[in-house]
Image (cartoon, rainbow, N blue to C red):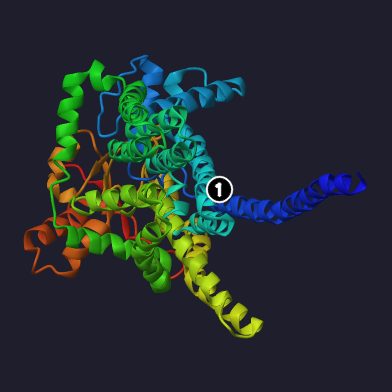
Amino acid sequence: MIQSTTLREAPAAVTRVPDQRVQRSAWPVWAVLTCVVVGGAALRFWNLIPGFPYRIGVDEPVIAERAIHMMKSGDFNPHFFDYPGLYIYVQMLVGCMRFITGSMNGLWRSLEAFHPTDLFLWTRALNAVLGTLTIVVVYRAGLRWGTWVALLAAGLLAVWPNHVRESHFALTDVPLTLLTTLTLVLSLRTIETGRLVWVVGAAACAGFAAATKYSGGVALVMPLIAGAAMNRPVPVRVWGVLAATGVAAATFLLGAPYTLLDLPGFLNGFALLMGHFYPRTFISGAEIYVGHLRVALGWPGLIVASVAVPWCVARAIRDRDAAKWALALIFPLYYFYMFATKSQIYARYVLPVLPFVCLIMAVLIVDVAGWISRLRQPYWVRATAAGAFVSAVLAYPVSEGIAWPIRYGRPITQDVAYKAILKFIPEGSRVVVERSVLRLPDSVYRSTDVRELTQRSRQQYLAAGITYFIASSDAFGQVMAKPAEHADAYQAYQRLFHEQSECLPPIQPTASVPGPQILICRFLPN
């Protein structure tokens, strides 16, 4: 009897010890994760507003102006379909909160006094929060490959220079990246549990991703894979695929209802947008995007990212877990291919790919570090080799991720120019700005952007009531540097600067104040 009691009690005593060890070991993991998230948040909020209100991302006013127009008009049709609509509605809600809180503090007495420059700080802060949340979601996804993979993937995204940069601007790319990464996590959960509720959640995220930016619709491939790969009978899997498709379509229309409510406007706007994305060869586009990756990762990181794809394919074959690996690989590879074959190329366009790159890079780094640790060498040799490998891969992106907000916070020629503009150009004047070198706040000036000032004559500008102009060397620099190749434009700029206007001394870039050369001028009367 004593023996049987001892045997019954022994397993209980044994099981308590591992539980205590798990609880103790969880503390360092959460400590590291907290440091990663806090560090990532610091990089995204650091120097969030230098140059307000004149140093603004190229599309930030486009979204903010339409959100504020909805607030002022009550017309929820964006009348603009370069973006589907969801993020415009989000900015409208943020704008309403901003206006209400500002009114309580006496900042505004009517909506007419509320301008996009009053909204940018709040919407940028929102994107910094969304960018930070994406780090947490990447960690949740990475747990399927182990704690070290999860922490390393989250750490890579926390310092990734492109993601740090874009989290400073109120554009669609950061929210889109969060939604596509959520789609990955919920799709993985679908495979693990076989429950339809998770595939519905993944499809909803994919639908909202498409409602944020049309390219987000590619994320639907993940819940479709998950629904088809569930460990359930075939009819259930068919229902999973159909449910994913239907829910994604419904949530897209929920986030962008005027896709149907203003069908002609959407079709015309979408066709106009696609006219700017004519095809190009994959090699030429991929070369540019790979260059962006090299700038963010350095050569060691780029090599690891390149090797990680075939490495993960090999792992998928070895592990016999094709569905999980397909979720990590198919979406980013197709998304990258889709944009590499389009004429318009910007680093932020492939931002949704970055969490997946972080994940597969982390898998390879942890696998290689694990292999090094198992070599038959003294411990200090193995530890040094593993540390050197990891440091070689991470050193460049970490340094660049920290350096970007520092560089962004330094003064540039636009800062000097804006101070001169406030002194030289009277409030309320109409101003034409070349190449959007800076944005003049609507509450102070009425400005118009042009690509080259020489597109119109002085008489045309004066007839339109425009009396001042701001010229940028981004436009006239090449013309002035090679007058023989641009003879007509050179003569036009010479007449504009020396005969048809009076200008302040040019604002020249220096080593400490970089940026384009800027001229601030007043048109002389006819």
Q: Position of residue 219 (x, y in %)?
A: 34, 40
Query: Can residue 428 be seen in the rendering of this structure?
Result: no
Mark 1 Cα-neighbour bin, 10 Å: few <14, some 14–19, many ≥20: some
Q: Is residue 329 left or right of residue 95?
A: left
The furthest residue to the front:
1
Amino acid type shown at disc 1:
Phe
| 380 vs 235: above or below | below
Q: Quadrant of the N terminus?
A: top right
Residue at which label 1 appears: 45
Residue 319 image-quadrant placement? bottom left
Secondary structure of the residue carrying numbered label 1: helix
Q: Is residue 250 left or right of residue 355?
A: left
Residue 413 image-quadrant placement? bottom left
Q: Is residue 35 left or right of residue 159?
A: right
Query: Can residue 492 be seen in the rendering of this structure?
Result: yes
The mark tally for this picture is 1
Q: Is residue 6 left or right of residue 250?
A: right
Q: Position of residue 478 (x, y in %)?
A: 19, 64
Q: Quadrant of the C terminus?
A: top left
Residue 63 image-quadrant placement? top left
Comparing 209 with 146, the one in front is 146
